Image: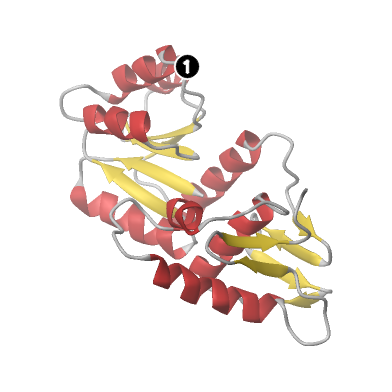
Amino acid sequence: MRLLVVEDDPGLAAALRDGLGARGFAVDRAGSAESALDLLGIDSYDLVVLDLGLPGMDGLAFLRVLRERANPVPILVLTARGDVADRVAGLDQGADDYLQKPFAFPELLARVRALLRRGVAMTPVVLRVADLELDPACFTARRAGAPVALTAKEFAILECFMLHAGELVTRTMLLEHCWDGSYEGVSNLVDVHVSRVRRKVDVPGVAPLFQTIRGAGFVLGERAR
């Protein structure tokens, strides 16, 4: 999942990026509403974490412009403004949830996951392909009933495959889903990570689920015709 953090405080933005990144999210950061709108016009994001107190265009104006553009991306507002009127104003302008500063990171993470579950229409909470299961809410994976130990990056990669089960998953798709916009590497890194996931999922004694399509990418499960 790819998130956009709109926060002008470099320290808080870095903490959010590190914390969410450690949980397997790819995180981009914008320091202003204007730059965030530019990014949202170029890239697709699964959720926006938005500070209302931004320089220039504030968070409420950002919300209004974004919703006028019919962009449905879920938005979690972070702000030091504690008045009920401020919370209502944010929700009225199109925010999906509201968290007051200072906040506990586990609560922010729970709200992010709840919004993501709400925003993925027709997608089951637990993803399944054959005897492989992935639970994004609990951050767990199982193959034939046995736990699969994954790093945060490996979890994000497997989630991308399971969301596109039976479809060709290209290296570009994996880079966009699992790495943030500042990454400028080559596909060799993708191949290394996919190989690690593959070794953990396609263990001896179970039917292999991964296929490599030479020159194109990878497929998890039986390829749709």
Asked whether the viewer can see residue 45, the reply is yes
Looking at the image, which residue sits at the far left? 56
| Residue positioned 41% across, 60% down in the render | 21
Query: 41 or 108: which is nearer to us?
Result: 41
Look at the picture and state if 46 lies above or below 165: above
Q: Secondary structure at mark 1?
A: loop
Q: Residue at x 83, y 63 (%)?
A: 130
In this rendered view, identify the residue nearer to me: 80 or 129: 129
| x then y, percent, for residue 48 | 42, 37
Residue 123 location (% of width, % of height): 72, 42
Residue shown at 74%/36% (left/top)?
122
Image height check: is 145 above or below 119?
A: below
How far from the left and from the top, in percent, is residue 207?
A: 82, 76
Which residue is situated farthest in the bottom direction here? 204
Instruction: Give x and y (percent) for residue 9.
Output: 20, 45
Query: Residue 221 vs residue 26: left or right?
Result: right
The colour mode here is: secondary structure
Task: Say which residue label 1 marks.
Answer: 70
Q: Is residue 156 left or right of residue 67?
A: right
Residue 150 shown left or right of residue 92 in the figure: right
Dot 1 amino acid type? Ala
As drawn, which residue projects farthest toward the front? 215
| Residue nearest the viewer, comparing 44 with 28 | 44
Question: Which residue lies at the image location 41% right of the left edge and 66% below the top edge?
Answer: 187
